[in-house]
Image (spheres, rainbow, N blue to C red):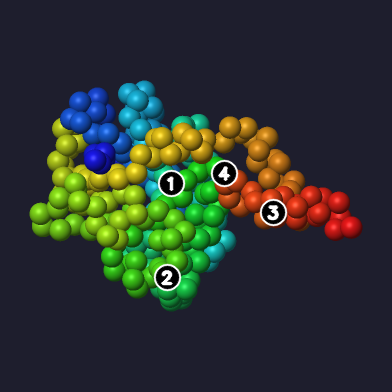
Amino acid sequence: MYKKGIDVSKWQGAIDWQKVRDAGIDFAMLRAGFGQGNLDPCFARNADECTRLGIPFGAYWFSYAYTPEMARSEARFCAAALAKYKLSYPVAFDFEYDSVDYASEQGVSVTKTLASELARSFCGEIRAQGYYPMVYANPNYLSAYFDAEIPKEFDIWLAKWPRDPDPAVEPAESGGIWQYSSSGTVDGIAGRVDLNAAYKDYPALLGAKAPEGEYGSEAERAREWCVSRGISDGLRPLEAATRQEVWVMLYRMEGGK
């Protein structure tokens, strides 16, 4: 079983989300923005409409980062855009050909090592902000720009568009969501739209982990407090700590004595 989804940005214009829902679409991935703080002009409306109509959604950020700090900064911009919404699907790092070309224009050659570091920086910060990270990639990028550990560390949103896709059969490279067409048609959307299949029950998975942050800004202040005192690295806030990690944190709290 899989759930039917779409991903959209400003290029789809004003969407009639009621018709989209009535057409049987189960979820949406919304472009929140791109680069250093550029919000997608349709994101707020799309997110508001999905919220109003009860359409589960996630988000993605198109990256123009060419340093790890730029990638972390993009993640913070993305998290700020998402702050007022409850997400039921992941937040994806979208790094594509335009991203590589932009880096080249800035005199930076994107290697597999650098692209993997950018993905980890973005996804690590997104996770620290309380969201479920994901990496968007086509098969070429998975082999040419991301190291073999990336699919083990993060879910993959696979972009692969065969002539006759069968979304009921998940591709081997997929790690949660498969974008199987760039030329779909859905009632309520003028023109073409990307079609997706989700193979994980993300609403249940994210609901169990409370990705929106049960304690809100207090949790973020606590994270900053722990990081500033060297008690914790501040990462993986939704994962359980081992006893060994608790011992180390308590040891550090006492000044290592």
* Residue 162 placement (x, y as % from top left): 15, 58
Along the line of sight, the residue nearer the viewer: 68 or 237: 237
Choose the circle earlier in sequence order: 2 or 4.
Answer: 2
- At label 1, the amino acid type is Val
Numbered disc in front, either 2 or 1:
2
Q: Which mark is residue 238?
A: 4
For mark 1, give the secondary structure: strand
Q: Can you name the residue that lies furthest to the front here?
A: 243
Residue under the point 45% across and 38% down: 206
- How far separated are the C-alphas under marks 2 and 1? 20 Å
Quadrant containing the C terminus is bottom right
Q: Is residue 24 above or below residue 104?
A: above
* Residue 208 placement (x, y as % from top left): 48, 35
Q: Which residue is mark 1?
A: 91
Residue contact at pointers 2 and 1, CB within 8 angstroms? no
Residue under the point 35% across and 33% down: 56
* Residue 13 placement (x, y as % from top left): 26, 38
- How far separated are the C-alphas under marks 2 and 4? 25 Å
Residue contact at pointers 2 and 4, CB within 8 angstroms? no
| Residue 12 visible in the picture | no
- At label 2, the amino acid type is Asp
Q: Which residue is mark 3?
A: 245
- At label 3, the amino acid type is Glu
Numbered disc in front, either 3 or 2:
3
Numbered disc in front, either 1 or 4:
4
Q: Which mark is residue 147?
A: 2
User: From the viewer's perspective, is 22 left or right of 257?
Assistant: left
* Residue 240 placement (x, y as % from top left): 60, 46
- How far separated are the C-alphas under marks 1 and 4? 15 Å
